[in-house]
Image: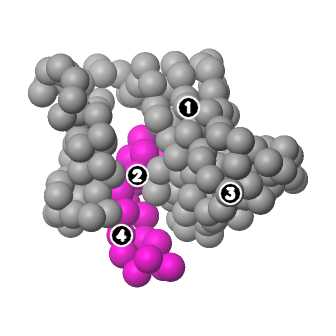
Amino acid sequence: PDHADSNYRMTREALLDHVRIPAANVHRMQGEIDPSQAANAYEYELRAFFGTAQPRFDLVMLGMGDDGHTASLFPGTAALDEEIRAVTANYVDKLHTWRITLTQTAINHAAAITFLVAGESKAVILREVINGPYQPEIYPSQLIDPVEGQLIWLVDDAAAALL
């Protein structure tokens, strides 16, 4: 939970340490254990908490990497094809490591999904994701398309320069 690459650590330091959210409402992926076990445990925890076959988050907050990835849905990885599970372990070759991620299915069932995209380095990829051809195996952020929710893009001027 304290690793430099931990999204939980980043979220805890930037948000959770500064607001009153009951500990029972914080559901952390256990990135420090075996990836498959962590994915299974997190999926079980979500299904138990939500009491439904498909979890429905009120809000999923996402970023977008310079390569068009979001969550830990990276270009060319197996997790892009997962349509049943809510959580999966995903080997990311370019990082030489396993990541645990919500799947497109889980994300797309949220009531609201926000992308926060900032910086000049994101301008080209943002243009491709939004205005380019649909190629989610190259631009995984294109997989995000809410089933019955809202999709909100929060983009600064530098990232939006080519739109």
The first of marks 2 and 3 along the sequence is 2
Q: Amino acid at mark 2?
A: Thr
Q: Secondary structure at mark 1?
A: strand
Tag 1 and tag 4, C-beta contact below 8 Å? no
Q: Are marks 2 and 1 in contact (CB under 8 Å)?
A: no
Q: Which residues are magenta?
A: 80-103
Q: Residues within 10 Å of mark 2 (few under 14, many from 20)?
A: many
Asked if marks 3 and 1 touch (Cβ < 8 Å), the reply is: no
**Nearest to N terminus: mark 3 or mark 4:** 4
Q: Earlier in the sequence, mark 2 or mark 1?
A: 2
Q: Earlier in the sequence, mark 1 or mark 4?
A: 4
Task: Say which residue label 2 marks.
Answer: 101
Which-is-in-front pick, marks 2 and 1? 1
Secondary-structure class at tag 3: helix
Q: Residue at x 32, y 63 (%)?
A: 5
Q: Is residue 66 magenta?
A: no
Q: Tell me the distance, in whole angstroms, between the alpha carbons under discs 1 and 4.
A: 25 Å
* Identity, as a three-letter code, of the amino acid under mark 1: Thr
Q: CA distance from mark 2 to mark 1?
A: 16 Å
Residue to which mark 1 is pinned: 114
Give the amino acid at mark 3. Glu
**3D distance between C-alphas at marks 3 and 1:** 19 Å
Q: Disc 4 designates what residue?
A: 98
Check disc 4 and report its element: helix, strand or loop.
strand
Q: Nearer the viewer, mark 1 or mark 4?
A: 1
- The residue at which mark 3 appears reads as 120
Q: What residue sits 17% from the left and 54% below the top?
A: 1
Quarter of the rendering containing residue 144: top right
